[in-house]
Image (tube, grey):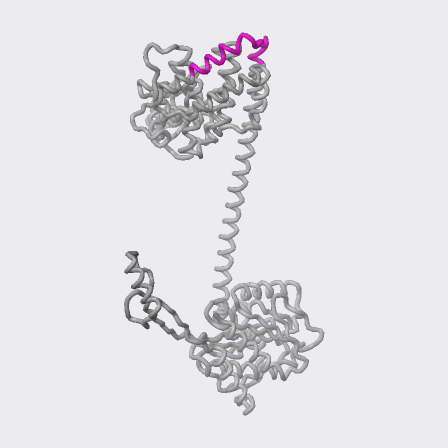
Amino acid sequence: MSAHHHVQSTPDDDADLARWDDDGAPPAQPRTSPAAWLRVGAELGDRLVALSGRQDLLVTCRPGTRSGAPAAYFPGLAEIEFDAGLFAPLKPHEIHPRIMGDEERYPAAWGVFVHEAAHAAHSVWTAPAGADPRVVEAALLLEESRVEGAHLITRPTDRTHLRTSARTLVMPDIAQPTLQGIEQAAGAAALILGRRDVGILDAGETRAVADLCEKVLGAPLLATLTRIWAAAHQCADHDATTMLAHGREWCDALDVAAPALPVPENLTDLLSGAVGVVMDSAAAVDAADLAAQAAATNAVAAKSKAQAQDRAQQASQRRKAAATAKSVFNTRGTTVNPDGAPAPYSNPVTGTRRPTAAEKSAAARLSRALRAAAYRERTEERTTSPTPPGRLNMGRALARDAQRAAGSIPTAEPFTQIRRRNSPTPPLRVGIAVDVSGSMRAACEPVASAAWIVARAAALTDPDSLSATIAYDTHLTALTRPGHRAPERVTNFAANGRSHNLANAIDALNHGLELSRLGTGRLLVIVTDAVYTADETTQAVTRVKQLTTAGCAVLQLTLTARSQHLPGTTLLHLPQPSSAPVAIAKAATDAIRRTR
């Protein structure tokens, strides 16, 4: 069994890709010659620095090698030679090792190259002159799995490449052995089971070779050989004496046991079959891992794409909502279509009136209730320190003196300081969307009154508090607008519309009042019987879910028994429409109280 097989691969010679520009001649074809592989070898040498940690190595790549192996490391020459045939069917101009990831196109070649890099990094010892050639050959056999195990410690991600190199390097050694008889079976065990014990191959994958070697070598001899290569795996890179001692122990164990062990006539075929099973199993596992990795990568890419599409859709929705809010909350008080175009003949507003004394009183009470709900106690921050300022704690002061007297570092902090900070009062954002389709006539008067009361109270509570009311059917009409000034008059409206457009009404209120923004008491009140089409319901529920996820309370007020519940809202049924102002006021107070 040969040792020191190592390999890796890639690129093309740009000089061989020169082409005529416009003279009509056919493009020049890249030449495949030994000289064309010089660039590949140079680029492999650049990558070898990271793999081996050495900068003094030369990589030569050419068709065929001097050693006859697919690849070989020559410590005395500080050279790795590489057979260009490992890159087949790629041509030199198609191979670019300097590009990270290009090695995925020629895994067999790269696996051999990583194996040779492991030799370059860890095969530091050399046999002294006059050493027994058989002992040296045994030590080099043990070296194969030892260097891969050492390489795996510093570069664990190279395991896949080392598994590939095993499939490339071991099978030729088994099919064309340099050792015979029991030594051939022992060599197969060292190459396969030794890689198992350093973590390159899995135990389940190598079972076929383990069973055959136990049958041919016997359990006692196999246990002895296993102990020898396990000890070699712990050997230092430079310790030639210990490696040769393991090589001699290996030879002695075979010499003692071999005479009593019969050699099967077809041992080479048996070993080739068992190793073939191992390599097929490893290839299947690697293919499954690669497929799983590709699936995971695709899943991440699909998720990223879906998130990007979702962000783009949300951005588009925000732009549309901004345009809708701008058109709805116009200063002229006109009704608009969902696209923002005026629809003056569909305006539900019937006029305005002065607020009653009861409405003024209700607005004042709600304002006081909102201020009380928004009040936050001052926060206290208590800190201790070994020095002033602060209040002195005599117990801690005595403890500090005792610590100092005992010769230890004082840790007690006798001074306590309390800092009190005022908590900001959260402003209020209340949006009211009222359905003005024909089935909602009973809600017109109480909702008009409630809209004025809430707008008036919000303006009186806090300069930053805002409210707005939108009447919607197919079209949208602003009854009250976001502003810091309290409305002077109550806007009356009628419910004679058809169909519904709650989704756009919510978008306009959300943008105009920033209902999705944290730090305020936010409430959306929807006054509707929710007798919608499936599409209208779906669009409205989507908006409601977005608001509730952002922490905005959403209340649905219904007036009739035939009303439907919009999923995601808190349903409040009001048999008496006149109680709507009180219900909205209570919900607004609760919303600002829950604000953090």
Residue 175 position within the rendered picture, expressed as x and y whole percent measured from the top left: 52, 14
Q: Does residue 276 show up? A: no
In this rendering, is residue 206 above or below 393? above
Residue placed farthest to the right in the image?
A: 562
Q: Which sits in the foreground, 173 or 297?
A: 173
Residue shown at 47%/11% (left/top)? 178
The magenta stretch is: 247-269
In this rendering, is residue 421 above or below 232? below
Task: Quadrant for residue 79, please give it.
Answer: top left
Residue 464 position within the rendered picture, expressed as x and y whole percent measured from the top left: 43, 76
- Does residue 490 belong to the magenta stretch? no
- Assign the magenta stretch its main secondary structure: helix
Side of 436 where 59 appears, left or right: left
Q: Which sits in the foreground, 82 or 323?
A: 82
Q: Does residue 583 show up? A: yes
Residue 363 position within the rendered picture, expressed as x and y whole percent measured from the top left: 52, 85
- Does residue 264 belong to the magenta stretch? yes
Q: Which sits in the foreground, 283 or 243?
A: 243
Q: Which sits in the foreground, 263 or 3?
A: 263
Residue shown at 46%/12% (left/top)? 252
Task: Quadrant for residue 407, please give it.
Answer: bottom left
In this rendering, is residue 91 above or below 331? above
Residue 344 position within the rendered picture, expressed as x and y whole percent measured from the top left: 55, 77
